Image (cartoon, rainbow, N blue to C red):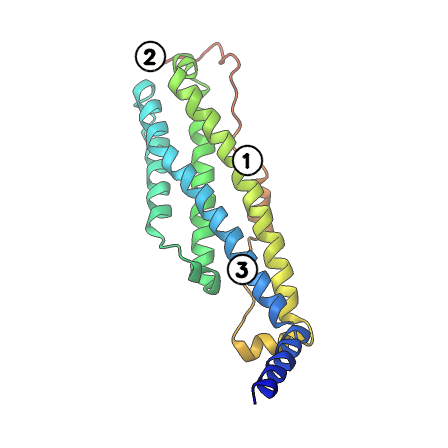
Amino acid sequence: MRRVWSLFLSVLAVSLAGCGYNTIQQQDEQVKASWSEVVNQYQRRADLVPNLVNTVKGYASHEREVLTAVTEARARVGAIQVTPETLNDPKTFAQFQAAQQQLSGTLSRLLAVSENYPQLKADAGFRDLQSQLEGTENRIAVARNRYIQSVQAYNVTVRSLPSNLTAMAFGYKEKPNFTVASEAAIAKPPQVEFGSAPASAGGAK
C-alpha cells in the first residue's frame, strides 16, 4: 500500500510539473517578492517627504501651492491600503499607480521651485534630502523594472497552453502591470542640481 501511495505521489508530482503548476508557483512568488520591493522603495520616498517639505518651508514658506500639493499627494499615497492582494485587484493597483505618479509630479515641482532659493540650495540638510531622494528614485526605477519583468513572465505562463488550464483550475489570474505612460514618467526622476541659482533668485530663511 505504501508503495502504491508513493507511486501515486510521484505520478502526481510529474503531472503537476508538466502542466506548469510548479512554474506558476515559482513565478507567483517572484511577483510577490518584486512587488514587496516596489512598495518598500515607494514607502522610503514617502518617508522623506515631511522633512523635505519642512526644510523648503523654512526658506520658501510663501510657496504654499506647491508645498500643499506635495503634502496632499503624500496623504493620498498613504490612504491607499497596499497588501499582497493588491496584485489581484486591478482597480486598487491603478489607484496606487496614479497616486504615486501624482507624488512624483509634485516632488518635481518642489525641486524646481527650490532652484529659486540659493540659501535653501546651500542648506546641508536640504542637500542631503535631495541626495536621498535621488537615490530612492533610482531604486524605485530598478524595483519597478524587476516587477514588470516578473509580471510579464507570470502572465505569459498563465495565458499559455497547457499551463493556462492549470491556472484556471487553481484560480491563478493575470496580474496588473505598470502602464507605458507611468514607465515614461518614472524614467525621468526628479533632477538634483547643485549648481548656481538664477541671478534673479531670492528668498531668505
Tag 1 residue:
138
The answer to whether mark 3 and mark 1 are in CB contact below 8 A is no
For numbered disc 1, what is the local secondary structure?
helix
Residue 120 image label: none
Amino acid type at mark 2: Ala
Sequence order check, earlier mark of 3 and 2: 3
Of badges 3 and 1, the one in the foreground is: 3
Foreground tag (3 vs 2): 3
Name the one closer to the observer, 166 or 43: 166
On residue 29, which mark appears? Answer: 3
Distance between the Cα atoms at labels 1 and 2? Answer: 31 Å
Q: Quadrant of the N terminus?
A: bottom right
Does residue 122 appear left or right of residue 137 in this picture?
Answer: left
- Give amino acid for label 1: Asn
Q: Please report the residue visible at 54 percent of the width from the left and 70 percent of the height from the top.
A: 173
Under circle 3, the secondary element is helix
Query: To which quarter of the image does residue 26 belong?
Result: bottom right
Question: At which x and y percent is residue 141?
Answer: 56, 41
Q: Earlier in the sequence, mark 1 or mark 2?
A: 1
Please name which of the two marks, 1 or 2, marks the residue nearer to the observer.
Answer: 1
Relative image position of residue 16 (x, y in whole percent):
62, 76
Q: CA distance from mark 3 to mark 1?
A: 24 Å
Disc 3 and disc 2 in contact, CB within 8 angstroms: no
Cα–Cα span, label 3 and label 2: 52 Å
- Contact, mark 1 vs mark 2 (Cβ under 8 Å): no
Count how many numbered circles sit on residues in the image: 3
Residue 196: x percent and y percent?
51, 12
Taking the spot 63% from the left edge, 79% from the top edge, the residue there is 10
Badge 2 crowding class, 10 Å Cα cut-off, few under 14, some 14 to 19, many 20 or more, is few
Report the disc number at residue 204: 2
Task: Provide residue 3's location: percent of width, then percent of height.
Answer: 61, 85
For the C terminus, the quadrant is top left
